[in-house]
Amino acid sequence: MKNKTLGFQPLQTLTHLAALTPLGLMVLDFATQNYGPEPINEFTLRTGKAALVILLLSLACSPIGRVFNYKKLLRLRRPLGLYSFLYASIHFAIFIGVDYFFNFNLIKDALLTKRYAIVGLTTGLILLILAITSTRGWQRRLKANWKRLHRLAYVAGILAVVHFIWLVKPGVSQPWFFAIILTALLLMRIKGFDRWIKSRMSKTPPLQAG
C-alpha cells in the first residue's frame, strides 16, 4: 500500500491555527472578563474584522499564487472562505442575539433603516451561499457556473469594506486601509496585470551588500 502524503500540510495547518487564533483570544478574553466597558461593541467589531481580514486573505490566494508561481496557495481559498463565514456568522449572532435580544421588530427596523446593517446582511447572505456551494459536489453540479458564482466573493469583499466604513465613526482610517488592499486585489484580476508585475520584479536590481 502506497504512502500518500498530503503536500502543503504544514502551511495548511498553520492557516487553520492562525484563522482560529482570533476566536481563541475572544473566548479567553470573555472567560477572564478581559474586555472594555462595551463588550458587545468590542466583540461585534472583533468578529467582523476577523471575517473581513480572512476574506481578503482568501481573495489574495489566487493573484499572489499567480505572481509568484505558487499555485499551492489555491488550496487555502476554501478553508479561509469558510473561516470568514464562521466569523461573519458569529458577528451576526451577536447582532441579533446579544445586541437586540432576538427582538425581531427592532432587528427589522435596523435592517430597513440602517444602511450598514443592510449591507452587512447582504454580505452575510453571499458568504452563506458561497459556503454551501464550496464542496466538490456543488462544483460537479454547477460545472462552469461554479466559478462564476464564486466570483461573488469579490462582491462580498466590497460590501464588507463598505459595511465597515459605514459602521465606524467618521475619521477612523482603518476601514480605508482594507479598502486599499481590496482595490489592489481587484486590480490584480485584470488580465495581464500579473505578467506586468512579474516583468517589473524581474527588472528590479538585486540589493548589494555593503
Image (tube, rainbow, N blue to C red):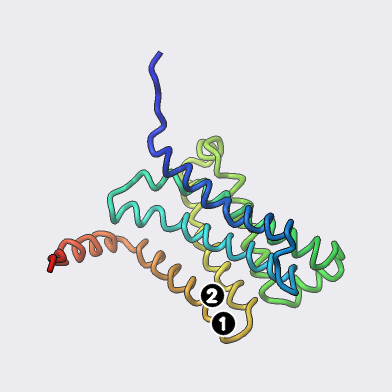
The residue sitting at 43% across, 38% down in the picture is 9
Q: Position of residue 29 (x, y in %)?
A: 68, 60
C-beta proximity under 8 Å, tags 1 and 2: yes
Location of the C terminus by quadrant is bottom left
Residue that label 2 marks: 175
Query: Spatial distance from mark 1 to mark 2, Cα to Cα?
Result: 7 Å
Q: Classify mark 2: helix, strand or loop.
A: helix
2 vs 149, nearest the viewer: 2
In the picture of the structure, the residue carrying the numbered disc 1 is 172
The location of residue 38, given as percent across then percent down, is 74, 73
Q: Nearer the viewer, residue 71 or 41?
A: 41
Which kind of residue does numbered mark 2 sit on?
Pro
Q: Say which residue appears at 61% left-offset and 53% top-offset.
A: 85
Q: Is residue 33 left or right of residue 120?
A: right
Amino acid bearing label 1:
Val
The residue at 55%/44% (across/down) is 134
